[in-house]
Image (cartoon, coloured by chain):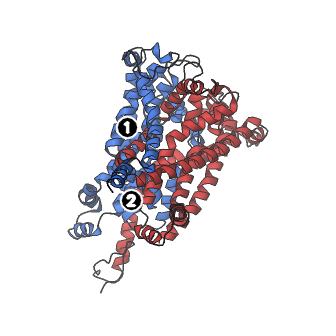
Amino acid sequence: MMRSRSRKGWRRVFNGVNLAALLVFLFLVLPLYWMIASSFKTPANVGAVPPQYVPHPVSVENYTVAFTRYAFGRYILNSVIVAVVATVLVLVLGTFAGYALGRLPMRGKFTLLVMLLMIAVFPEIAVVSPLYLLLRSLGWLNSYQALILPYTAFFLPFAIWILRNYFLAIPHEMEESARIDGASPVRTLWSVILPQAWPGLFTAGIFTFTACWAEFLMALTFNSSNDFRTIPVGVALFGSQFTVPYGTIFAASVVAVVPIGILVFVFRRSVVSGLTAGVVKG
Amino acid sequence: MTTGTTATGVARPAPSRPGGEDVFRRKLARLGWGFTAPALIVVGAVTVFPILFSVIMSLSNVSVTGNGFKLSGVTSANYAALIHSDLWRYALTFTVVYAIVTVAVEVVLGTLIALVLQRLTVGRGWMMALLLIPWSMITVVNATLWGYIYNPTYGVLDDILSYIGLGTPVVLGTPVPAIIALMVADIWKTTPFVAIIVLAGLIMLPRDLFEAAEVDGATGWSTFWRITFPLLRPTIALAVLFRMLQAFGLFDLPFVLTNGGPGHSTTSLAIFGYDTMIADFDFGPGAAVATSAAVLALIGCLAFLRVFRAQVGREA
């Protein structure tokens, strides 16, 4: 009797499901560990044979090299400027469009939404060359607007979807009473709807920011000069084809990836709800 | 007496005169288009217009001049060159096969992970959050990380393989292992996305169905194939199409990890298009490559639309 009960307690922790979960955990974490650990090796030990499984001695030299010998600080600044401005634009345009598509009686709404979803997943390569020629004619290559404008357009459709789903869920009564009180539609949106849609704005914001932060093809094509490189372009063009300064790259990567990782980790609930907005809820 | 309902089915107070409701609705619809117009203009200007422009470019002779460019004449030469190009045919085949294989593996693995996490008794929230980390990672960073793991001299993969007696292969030096290596790096980053979507779908399934199955004495395996999977199918189908369309645009990973090589073995359509347009400044043929990528995506989109309509129809 005693024995079977203790066995059951043991089983609660060491069962097949939890062991499988442990495998999943290792699958996810080991590559991350490898990146972070390698960034703290000395530049010479990054190429040690056999590889150092635990950095010894621990060094921050890769971090200082990334910021002093390479202009990594500048790349971060560029990424922040582009991502913040594009995210603000997406949220402003997306709020109006998401509200209209979620709550106002427009004909052809559904077709429009599906078309937006299509644009959200369209391959960038299809638009890069005409945009390149266009930006070149305007003299906008290597400028912030060369990325802000395409990012706003490309990431807007998904944000509209997320926002629309949040707007749909807000009860109609409050809007009605605001209207009866004679408030204008813009005022109703601003002071009645928006205060309740904060989680949606937040989710759409995280998504847009993360997408801008990681975008590579357009950043590489439009802004390859050293002064306007964003983080992904900077990381990809560190070193040359034959010598890749992995230590420096990992130090830079940890700086670029960890803040977003923490952000996503802390706000996982809203990120998950946003991820599933276009797919599960329909 | 109420005279009508809105699109959302909420009855409005009776209007003061007949037909007033219609006027009011029309006013709201106009307002809706007004609110939507700025977003549509921006999206159209930067996506729809360039796609059309790209098609025009692919059908004419493009010459790049000092600060601008010139289109002259109508020609099919760009497409003729494309069809006769072995590399284009290879890139197209590679992109499609790559998308199918990676997405298939992701869906199987992602579903398994979702099923495991659904039953997990310890630390489920943490695991969910952990799934989001690879998804949020910059692809270029992911590619560099795997390049370091695969490195032939000091890479950790060869160290592990030689420890278990499998020798030290030069993973990125030969075509097939390089393609597999690319797929592994991709699968690591994107399987969590599929797992999250499927897990969200699982949580939304009605619980009483499973209780009934348990009462009837169904085994785990048959419950999965007879109840869980059919109910999850629309969710999985949408995740598949999302990922397929993303995979058709494959660029960042091979650009950094293999630069399209060894030889041309990992040259995707996007890599080929980039090399033609930006590296070689061949805009006419480049536009033809881009258009072929757009057509491929469009085919994917039409499939997407069918599945989407089917799902929405089921919900209604």
Image mark for residue B96: none
In depth, the one of B26 and A172 nearer the eye is A172
Chain letter corresponding to the colour blue:
A
> Circle 1 sits in a helix, a strand or a loop, which is it?
helix
Q: Does residue B265 appear in this view?
A: no
Q: Is residue B282 left or right of residue B28?
A: right
In the depicted structure, whether residue A89 falls above or below residue B198: above
In depth, the one of A205 and A45 nearer the eye is A45
Expressed as whole percent of the image width and height from the top left, the position of residue A277 reads 42, 56
Q: Does residue B313 appear in this view?
A: yes
Expressed as whole percent of the image width and height from the top left, the position of residue B8 reads 37, 72
Residue under numbered circle 1: A261
Mark 1 residue type: Gly
Chain B appears what colour? red
Mark 2 residue type: Asn
Label 2 vs 1, first from the N-terminus: 2
